[in-house]
Amino acid sequence: MRVAVGIPVAVAALALAACGPTGADAGSIDPQIDAVGTDLATDPNVTVLDDLEYGVAGGVPLLLDACLPPDRAVDAEPVPGILVIHGGSWREGTKDSVGWRAVCTWLAAAGYPAFSVNYRLAPEWVFPAGFDDLQTAVTWLRDDERAERFGTDPARIGVFGGSAGGNLAALLGTSGSGDLGIGPRVAAVVDLSGPIDLTGVDLTDDFAPLQLEYLGCDNFADCATAEPASPNAHIDDSDPPFFIAHSTTEKIPLDQSEHFVEDLRAEGIDVEFLVADGTLHSIALLDDDLKSRILAFYARTLGLPAPPADD
């Protein structure tokens, strides 16, 4: 079943990449949000399993929350799972904050078991500590015991991240090479407003100290971790499809995503790129339209049918 699903999806992705947009071409979106967070409500029908330990690192228990689709039959076919990575400038934020819990339950209500993850944060833990934790989380989810418990297909794990979480999601997507269904590799990436090139380019003055703190460096010129922490430094033609959304004048410069999209497409990677006019950042972009586009992207790349539109 897993092979039969994966082959058509992979072929479709390759076909779309071959005839799709090039360079930094982007579609436009116009988020219809009255105030930040108004479209981020927790779904009460979703079962949430809190504080599951997926590992221990540096003496720190690593925890995630599992958000499980409602009314799922015990003998149902496996479906893709999605790892959800919170933002917070790599130094704050949690898996169960209001907005990120809402993302986790939204994806679960759409049929995807979703897993909102905590990871070690700066300044106590600098790169690659948090990223190592996320690779551990992917391999933990891929284990047969977890796949059976959550009803997931270990060959189809997607990832969703925003802001610093978008950087980490993108780095999961470009790290490694080859088969997307093994080890810490992921099969589809959604990145909202992620900083991509951490070497000191396309960077605002107020964000530079936070980026250096995360990298464990005093300056960019002598920072040995800047390139390894940059998703654009690891792209190859085996990387998964990407969905990227960014605003024109937000805290992370749009150039970050534009250059990343160009580099991905130059390697033949399927990229859906959307730009919003304004300042909305990360999951503040999530109105009904963007959520439906993201679900359609996951359905196309991971193989789960998109839910029917509301009447």
Image: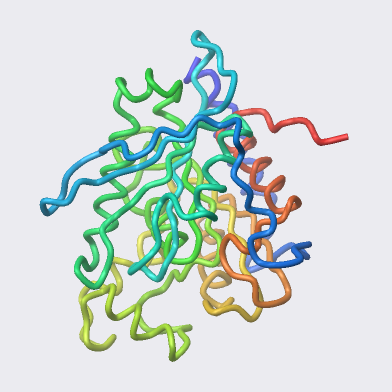
The single residue placed furthest to the right in the displayed view is 311
Residue 14, image x, y percentages: 58, 41
Counting every numbered tag in the picture gives 0
Kindly indicate the quadrant of the structure image that contains residue 105: top right
Residue 108, image x, y percentages: 56, 34
Q: What kind of colouring is applied to the model shown?
A: rainbow
Residue 31, image x, y percentages: 75, 63
Report whether 183 appears left or right of 294. Answer: left
Q: Quadrant of the C terminus?
A: top right
Q: Residue at x 51, y 44 (%)?
A: 188
The single residue placed furthest to the bottom in the displayed view is 205
Q: Which residue is drawn at 38% across and 85% down?
A: 208
170 or 218: nearer the viewer: 218
Q: Which residue is drawn at 30% across and 20% down?
A: 145
When the figure is inspected, residue 4 is found, relative to residue 191, above or below; the finding is above
The single residue placed furthest to the left in the displayed view is 59
When the figure is inspected, residue 289 is found, relative to residue 250, above or below; the finding is above
The single residue placed furthest to the top in the displayed view is 75
Q: Residue at x 27, y 58 (%)?
A: 130
Residue 270, image x, y percentages: 58, 50
Report whether 44 appears left or right of 194. Answer: right
273 or 207: nearer the viewer: 207
Report whether 8 appears left or right of 172. Answer: right
257 or 8: nearer the viewer: 257
When the figure is inspected, residue 201 is found, relative to residue 65, above or below; the finding is below
Kindly indicate the quadrant of the structure image that contains residue 56: top left
Kindly indicate the quadrant of the structure image that contains residue 53: top left
